[in-house]
Image: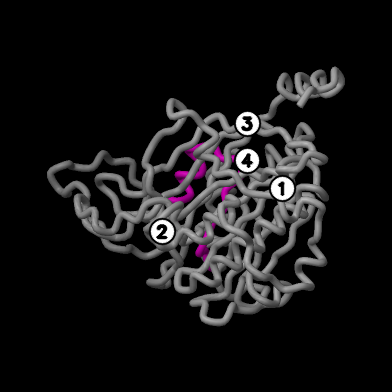
Amino acid sequence: MQLSQTTILALLATLSQATTIRLHNWNLRYDSKKDGVSLSDTISSLQSSAIPDETNFSYYSDYTEETWSKRRIGVANEVIFNKDDVFCVNEALKRQVDDLQSLLNKYDDSEWGYVGLGRDDGKEAGEYEAIFYKKGTMSVESWYTVWLSNTYDVPSKYPGAGSYRTATIAHLKTNDGKKFTLINAHLDDKSDDQRRLGASMLRHLGAYEYVNSDGPVFLVGDFNSHADGNSDGAYLISTGALDQVSMNSTFTSNFDSPIASTYTWSDLVGEVPEISRSGHWGTWAGFKAWGDWSSLGGRIDFQFGGKPNHDNVETKYYDVKRYRVSETFYDMQFRLSDHRPIITDIDL
């Protein structure tokens, strides 16, 4: 395809004025061991600046699941130290979302906001697929939620699924005017049929957003689906290797687009040369002892970029500069989650 001079000049202008965002997504492990410890009590217990005596602890000894009241400080510190611009979470309950909002705004040098809702009732009950954003670098122009079920617009669960499943869709704009759409989703851990339906809906939804919103479209989240193997259906549907399954006709009509049949998601790890990849490969780590590799489950958490694959629709610019699967288990602490986070630097 031959590009016009105008298109080339526009592309060069875009490249010369690229804005880099740091995108971080993480399944936090829900608050399954509530202990009633307040956030202020946790903060008060960590005020000492004394250097620990190394003879009094064993490295990598506390590998079982800890309470959220212990884990939350470490999670917030990861976001702050990594200097994220956008932080997407899976499995976070209302208390966890509120704690992170408080910690980020208390200890980071920039104000944070978030969008998202509880999946069980569309208000505050159940898991949030929350999207946190640093107000010092960007804003949310609008957002909405879709249930990944046969009734997408009301709180609902797919038959046979273990839980309600949702996607949060946000339209964001950087402070220098670059716009993009971000979808944060969590597919079911029990039902492969739900995962395949959810992946089909996310692909259809991505196509709609691509032609109706400004800037590129990204999808992140825990798919509970590998890139290959017995649970790869959702991933293969997302990337276009398998066809979409049948979806609710009202949903497909309301979110129709001219690229609904051609649009696919591109796995961002495949858009980065090996020299710019770092950290782990697998994103599932479990709560097993250090050195027990039986719980390692490969990649089930992902970041994707939208591709129109259509002659009449322009490919929107983005460039993935770095990709990292980070750590959750430090030598003298405990596992922050049973999943590892993904962090990318993306030029818009």
Q: Based on the picture, tell me whether residue 91 belongs to the magenta stretch.
A: yes
Which residue is disc 3 drawn over? 319
Task: First in sequence, mark 2 or 4: give its number.
Answer: 2
Which residue is disc 2 drawn over? 42
In whole angstroms, how far apart are the C-alphas of marks 3 and 4? 25 Å
Q: Based on the picture, tell me whether residue 78 belongs to the magenta stretch.
A: yes
Q: Label 3 is placed on what type of residue?
A: Asp
At horizontal 25% and vertical 47% (from top left) the residue drawn is 332
At horizontal 82% and vertical 40% (from top left) the residue drawn is 312
In whole angstroms, how far apart are the C-alphas of marks 1 and 2? 35 Å
Determine contact: label 1, label 3, CB under 8 Å. Answer: no
Q: What is the quadrant of the C terminus in the image?
A: top right
Hey, which residue is sitting farthest left in the picture?
Answer: 55
Residue 322 shows up from this direction? yes
Q: Quadrant of residue 138?
A: top right
Q: Nearer the viewer, mark 1 or mark 2?
A: 1
At label 2, counting other C-alpha atoms closer than 10 Å, the crowd grade (few under 14, some 14-19, many 20 or more) is: some
Q: Which residues are magenta?
A: 71-93
Which numbered circle lies on residue 181? Answer: 1
Determine contact: label 2, label 4, CB under 8 Å. Answer: no
Q: Quadrant of residue 249?
A: bottom right
Determine contact: label 3, label 2, CB under 8 Å. Answer: no
Secondary element at image label 3: strand
Secondary element at image label 2: helix
Task: First in sequence, mark 1 or 2: give its number.
Answer: 2
Residue 144 in the image: state x and y as whole percent.
74, 62
Q: Label 4 is placed on what type of residue?
A: Ser
